[in-house]
Image (tube, rainbow, N blue to C red):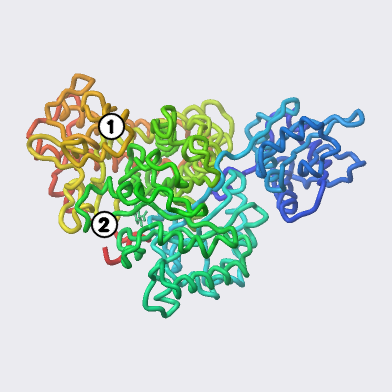
Amino acid sequence: KDGYKLWLDYQPIDNASLNTEIEELFKGVYFFGKNPTYEVIKKELGLASKGFFNHNPEFKNLNQNAHLWIGTRTELTQYLGLEQQAKIKALGDEGYWRGTINQGGESHYAIVGNSPIGTLYGVFDFFRSIQTGTFDSSSEKSDSPKIKLRMLNHWDNLDRTVERGYAGFSIWDWHKLPGYVDPRYIDYARANASLGINAVSLTNVNANAWVLREDFIEKVKVLADLFRPYGIQVFLTARFSAPIEMGNLETADPLDAEVKNFWKERVDMIYKEIPDFGGFVVKANSEGQPGPHEYGRNHAEGANMLAEALAPHSGIVIWRAFVYSHEIDEDRHKQANLEFEPLDGKFMDNVIIQVKNGAIDFQPREPFHPLFGAVDETNLGMEFQITQEYLGQATQLVYLSPMWEEVLQSKTFRPSPNSTVAGIIDGSATNKKLTLMAGVSNIGTDRNWTGHLFGQANWYAFGKLAWDPYQNSSDIANEWISLTFGKDPETKSKILSIMLQSHEAAVNYMTPLGLHHIMGRSHHYGPGPWVEGGRADWTSLYYHRANTEGIGFDRTATGSNALGQYASEIASEWSDPNLIPEKFLLWFHHVPWDFQLKSGKTLWEGIAFHYDQGVKSARSFHQTWQTLEGLIDQERFNHVNQLLKIQVKEAEWWRNACLLFFQTFSNRPFPDDIEQPTGDLDYYKSLRFPFAPGIKPNW
Ligand code: BDP
């Protein structure tokens, strides 16, 4: 039980009648066609059958005892009524239906997709229903994804370090590709396909042009060929200055004819090798990355130049909105909207602007990004961060789904009064078809893939929300727990309670009440509210602005007015420190230490209370976990138990460091009803951290 099998660990079925029923199905499998995806399904059936029954499935002819039918709608036309066919068709290419078909006095359980990939999704869902014990042959199920591109972004460097990766090194073994195919690639594809993830960008957004060279494309082709039957399209990051670095040109100006030609030739070469190549993900003019600004061009001119090269092949450009420059004297919060709002309508149809969930940078909690709702003629995609850069990295159990759900459910009031971020992402609010949810991957070479076992739950939840952004975190967690730890009710409810509280707990002991960006410099691990010097927008002082009067960033009209970038409904309510949800108070307001919170506490007492609560929650997670000893296998028990112990220490570290530091401004005692922070501020400030993979050495 080392976690390698993820949620695809097919275990014997404990319910005897379900076991008999399913075993019958596996003894008579019939495929209505032939294609590489059906080969993949056959292999998966083999693995599932071995796990469930310890024997192989039996593949039959149609007129033998074929109980389990697998095919597409068109392959099964003659067995489906017209109305049913229409219903299935309406589910779209990747949709599926599964249920019982009665034919000639016999009943067959059928899994029917609109395409082989839809069928594959149906099969994985069928397995999931067996694993969770919810399979019911008398009820039908149909489903289809709400978002077109459900994508992982790997921030993997070609030397196999992973920027912000905490689970070992990159799983892409560029050195041994194309000749050697690591079996992990297949297990990776299976895991993604089981969730409906259908796109991956292989390389770091801080891109290396090298990956666009012929020899690398040969390696990428191997991965693309492997992933194709699983429905996964491959993307690469494109370094904007590649024409200079590898094309020997003097410029990368997007309007220059030679530059355009460079990209056209490069793209044509890639498509010769990989005919269904997805396209490019681009970070330009952000944190020192090259981009169109160097040539006096804007983001639309940059993106469209690449989009033109890709369009003949149906490729797309995913252009990131994470742009900011310390040379601009504007609240970093505002910069993306300032750059992208004026460009609304100027991007080609095959461009998607990929927007982080919040305007700063994957902080433990952020209000939704004001670009959602601010443009209506631009394709907007969501970028979440699955890897826990700011949320405890690989030592902390933080289930991220509630944070994502909070963002997705946020009302934007634009384009219409009922619009939500989810509605913009899935195109229902905007009538957009090219929709995207991307997640920055937390996957590495660690045996359990994600470093912390519970990191798997975040990969899982991301896939689920990308499929359907309206799902709730509790259902997702429940399902993941059953698949991972089995169905014992006591085990399940204890783990569920830890998971569902874990994000709020982390926010409490890291950045309560809207505080943000107060972590250690560069590695972003642990507290660093004192960080100052160098680029202002990379310091903590810039964000918390603590002084003897109070704390917080005034983003109302009296301050940076970032609030003005939201719909007026939000701007007017949140401008009032008494009306804004308290979780965002210090994000938008500089508030006096004695400001009264809804609880009746002063702000200072409230801050102290939240930090203290966070520590108490972390301790309660560890205590609850300890009661699971014997209920789950020792290996995973120990793994999580040790990490939870570290998490408690880190929560205490955050609380002590932050409260001792902020007290130097508040000049007030700690409230009596909290555990008194211990330690010495100078000691916390003096702590240094080891080098970790992915940290840029020159930081
Ligand atoms: C920040 C990370 C940095 C990334 C950047 C990005 O610290 O490593 O390169 O985001 O998204 O959160 O481009």
- Which structural element holds mark 2? loop
Image side of residue 312 versus residue 586, left or right = right
Task: Give the labeled residue for mark 1.
Answer: 571
Label 1 sits on what residue type?
A: Ala
Looking at the rendered image, the disc whose residue lies closer to the viewer, 2 or 1, is: 1
Q: In the depicted view, which residue is nearer to us: 634 or 586?
A: 586
Q: Residues within 10 Å of mark 2 (few under 14, many from 20)?
A: some
Q: Residue at x 78, y 47 (%)?
A: 56
**Image disc number at residue 430:** none
Task: Give the labeled residue for mark 2.
Answer: 325
Q: Residues within 10 Å of mark 1 (few under 14, many from 20)?
A: some
Q: Position of residue 688 (x, y in %)?
A: 23, 56
Q: Are marks 2 and 1 in contact (CB under 8 Å)?
A: no
Q: Position of residue 200 (x, y in %)?
A: 53, 55
Ligand 1's image quarter is: bottom left
Residue found farthest to the top: 600
Image side of residue 20 versus residue 200, left or right = right
Q: In the figure, residue 676 lies in which quadrant?
A: top left
Q: Residue at x 21, y 44 (%)?
A: 543
Q: Position of residue 694 (x, y in %)?
A: 37, 60
Disc on the earlier residue, 2 or 1: 2
In space, the residues marked 2 and 1 are separated at their CA atoms by: 25 Å
Q: Residue at x 8, y 31 (%)?
A: 668
* Quarter the C terminus occupies: bottom left
**Is 291 above or below relative to 179?**
above
Q: Position of residue 426 (x, y in %)?
A: 51, 39
Q: In the depicted view, which residue is nearer to us: 262 or 160?
A: 262
